[in-house]
Amino acid sequence: MSDSPERVYPMLLDFVRKETISKNLLRVTLTGEDLIGFPEDQNGSHIKVFFPNQASGILQLPVREGDNVIWPEHKPVPRAYSVRQYRAAVNELDIDFVTHGEETPGGGWALKADIGSQIGLIGPAGPDPLIEPADWHIIAGDLSAVPAISAILEKLPSDAKGYVFIEVDEIEDIHDLVHPEEMAINWLMRNPHDAEPALAKAIKQLPAPEKATSLSAFIAGENQSVINCRKILRSDYQIARDKLYAIPYWKRGKTEEAYHDERHDVMDAAY
């Protein structure tokens, strides 16, 4: 995997429209002069989004001076998201937000966004491709990973084979995905009383033939679920580390600020 190019300066983007994808997934389309030249082949890549200061409601973006980042008086709230799609012909960027209620920086902003709403953005960044070429693919994640998973599926060759597992809390979040015919899509309902995350259990129960072929995997979502899936893929499937991209997006019971350092420890850990 190579790293995708990162546009390191904060872009200021304007709200265009929004579209409900499922009960708890909302697509916001953005545009702006700063967006011109954004790479069109980076759907699914990581981006950092800056939301208005929660106390004042004012959006002021940081500036970069050499290696230093200078934060403004009204410090914005940064959150990590994925590029859903960029259309250069009309200079529009789609970002899909999981909506947890109006009190959250990202989902709350998306729910209330209207003409005149703005955000800041840095990116894209991250590995390219998000999943390595192989005979078989395993893709797994929760609702927060659906934007990246959707982009991956749309990029895969038409003859790609494998399994996709997506864990959701509510049946109303199940929706159609564009995918190669032989990529089997499996929606799983989270059971809060189950000691083992549904994604790890599903991967562990895959039939034998897929374990014997060239395999690559993309895993994203909640911290413990990602760790468990990663462990199974390395121990049971003996998947090569360079064929496995596992990234935790969030941790149950922790804010993104509180989880930041632990998240990077998980990503950097030897496995």
Image (cartoon, grey):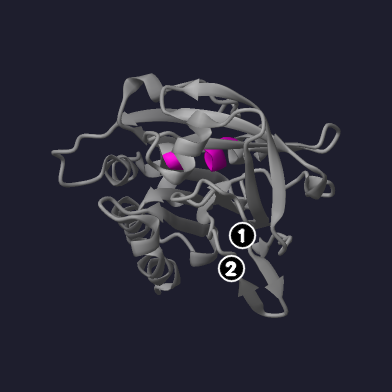
Q: Which residue is mark 1?
A: 126
The residue positioned 36% from the left and 43% from the top of the image is: 208
In the depicted structure, whether residue 111 falls above or below residue 36? above
| Residue 77 drawn in magenta | no
- Where residue 1 appears, as percent x and y from the top left, is 64, 62
- Tag in front: 2 or 1: 2
Q: Earlier in the sequence, mark 2 or mark 1?
A: 2
The residue positioned 52% from the left and 56% from the top of the image is: 78
Q: Which residues are magenta?
A: 144-150
Q: Is residue 157 visible?
A: no
Q: Is residue 266 left or right of residue 155?
A: left
Q: Is residue 223 left or right of residue 191?
A: right
- Where residue 251 appears, as percent x and y from the top left, is 32, 54
Give the numbered dot on residue 71.
Answer: 2
| Residue 148 drawn in magenta | yes
Q: Is residue 153 left or right of residue 203?
A: right
The residue positioned 39% from the left and 72% from the top of the image is: 265
